[in-house]
Every structure is written in structure tokens, then in C-alpha cells.
Image: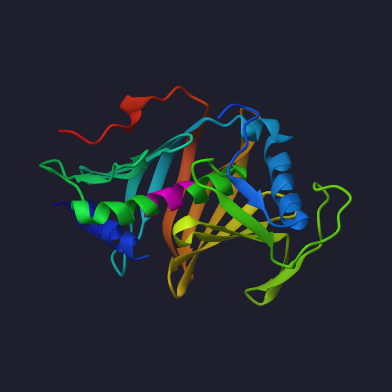
Amino acid sequence: MSRLGIRLAACVVAGVAVAALHAQDGAVFKDTTAESIFRAARVAIGQGEGKVLALRSLVLKGKSRVVLGDQPAVDATVEIRVLLPDRYLRTDVADASRLMTGFSGKSLLTSIDDGKEISSPPPNLHAGLLKVEQARLTRLLLGMAAYVSPYYFVTFRAMGGQADLASPLQAPATTVIRDGRLDQNVIEGAGRDGFFVRMFVDAGRYPITLAYRATKDAMNEMTFADRREVDGLRLPFRISTKDGKRTIDDLVFDQVSVNVPLGDADFAPSRR
């Protein structure tokens, strides 16, 4: 197996440890402050909520840099496909190896092709890895577009409690301490299988950071930057994930496409 295959195979194993336009998505709110922050983010991203709720598919293409343990970073080309409500596939290619991670419905798509053979996780790991990939899709959609697939409900609450707002789109002044400084506009989301995320919104009302549990005792952070307009949506062209102070996954896209036609063949299991 190649260098990329060996390292990313370990990543896969480590991961176990750790609707129509007017249809509702999977975001649920416990208070008006959380709803205010979330909906204001959608308005900023789509100049209104309609374009965000009309999201059906995404195709992201660019470069990735992945770090595992103390090993040197692996540089690769990356493509991510999303078809709502429940299909997600990320493909990293480098050193003549291809890593596919994701799912289609209840089927895990994760596999490694090192140019000689295709290997997949053993069946006893599928259920755990499926939950890992579902959580990854949820975080991706939340940070990119303030959207939650109806396939995976998330309930949000404001960090500072509920505020009495005349309109749910008014920006509250809730603050919390983060890294020794005050941050405004923070909400927490929880879902099934222990899913947890803390979303930080910047002064422009865009999701800028997601903090989430990597393990029981550790938190990772995803940052979303370089937003550009794509078919009326302000979407990030860079997504970085940090484990403490170290960047372990850095995605830089040169192409982001919205609502492109995708079907079964785009989420087929890897075959030789």
C-alpha cells in the first residue's frame, strides 16, 4: 500500500474512536436567540433564506493537505460530492492512491485504492464509520451554508440563554469566553449518536468556526474562509480543521458548484 494509503487507512480507523424548496430542513431551536443567530447566518449567505433552503447538491474540487500523527503532510487533489438529503462522498488522490470516504443512504462508501488493490473497512466497523461520515456531512453543510439536512436533525440553543427579540433576525449580543477572549453570536447544536457542535458567527453573520468533539476529551475546530458568491450563495473556498494548534486537514477549492445534476453513479462503491 502506498504512503497515502497507509496514513489515510489509519485515519479511517481512528475515526471510529472518535425535500422541496419549502420543506423544512433539520434545524430545530430551543430558544429565539439560537434561531436568530442561525437564520441571520442564512440571510447573510443567501441574501435571504430561500436560496439556502433550495440547496440540493454540491460539488467541491481543489487541493487537500492531510496530517496524521507525526508524519509529513500528504498533499492531494480532492473532490467532494453532496446530494441531499443523505449522500456524501469525498475523494482524495495522491501518490497513485485514492481514498474515498462517505456514504449513500445506509451504505458506507469508504475504501482505499492503492493502484494494485481496493481495500475497505471490515463489516464490523461499518456502523461506527457510517456515523462518523454522517457527522462530517452535517458539519460541512452547517459551516458552509447554515443548513442541516432533514436526514440528520440538530437542536440548537444559545450559549448565553434566551433573549427577548422583536424579530428572530435581530442580532443578539450574547457573548461567551473562548480562548481567553469574548466572542459574540455563539450557538450549540446536538443531535443523535452524541453529535455536538459549537458554531461561532462573525460580524458579517457568516459561520466562521465550528468546534466539535474529536474524542471524549478533545475538541477540534473547523474554520470556513474565503467566501465567494456561487449562484447567489456566499460559500467558503477554504476549510481548515485544527487539532489543538495543528492543522490536520486543509481544503482549498478552486471550483464550487451548486445544484448540479448528481445521481446513483456519482455515489457508487469503488470498483476496479
Picture coordinates of residue 184, whole percent (x, y): 74, 63
Q: Is residue 34 above or below residue 259?
A: below
- Answer yes or no: is residue 74 visible: no
Q: Looking at the rendering, which quadrant does residue 23 occupy?
A: top right
Residue drawn at x 51%, y 51% as measured from the top left: 139
Span shown in magenta: 132-137
Judge whether residue 84 can be spotted in this image: yes
Q: Specify the farthest residue to the right.
A: 166
The answer to whether residue 147 is left or right of residue 12 is right
In this rendering, position of residue 43 left or right of residue 4: right
Q: Residue furthest top?
A: 261
Residue shown at the point (66%, 77%) measured from the top left: 180
Image coords of residue 90 (percent x, y): 37, 42
Picture coordinates of residue 4, whole percent (x, y): 24, 52
74 left or right, relative to 160: left
Instruction: Give the prevailing secondary structure in the magenta stretch.
Output: helix
133 is within the stretch colored magenta = yes
What residue lies at 35% left-to-right and 44% top-to-bottom? Answer: 102
When the figure is inspected, residue 270 is found, relative to residue 38, above or below; the finding is above
Residue 213 included in the magenta stretch of the image = no
Nearer to the camera, 184 or 106: 106
Q: At 80% across and 48% down in the image, what residue appears?
A: 168
Look at the picture and state if 98 lies above or below 136. Answer: above
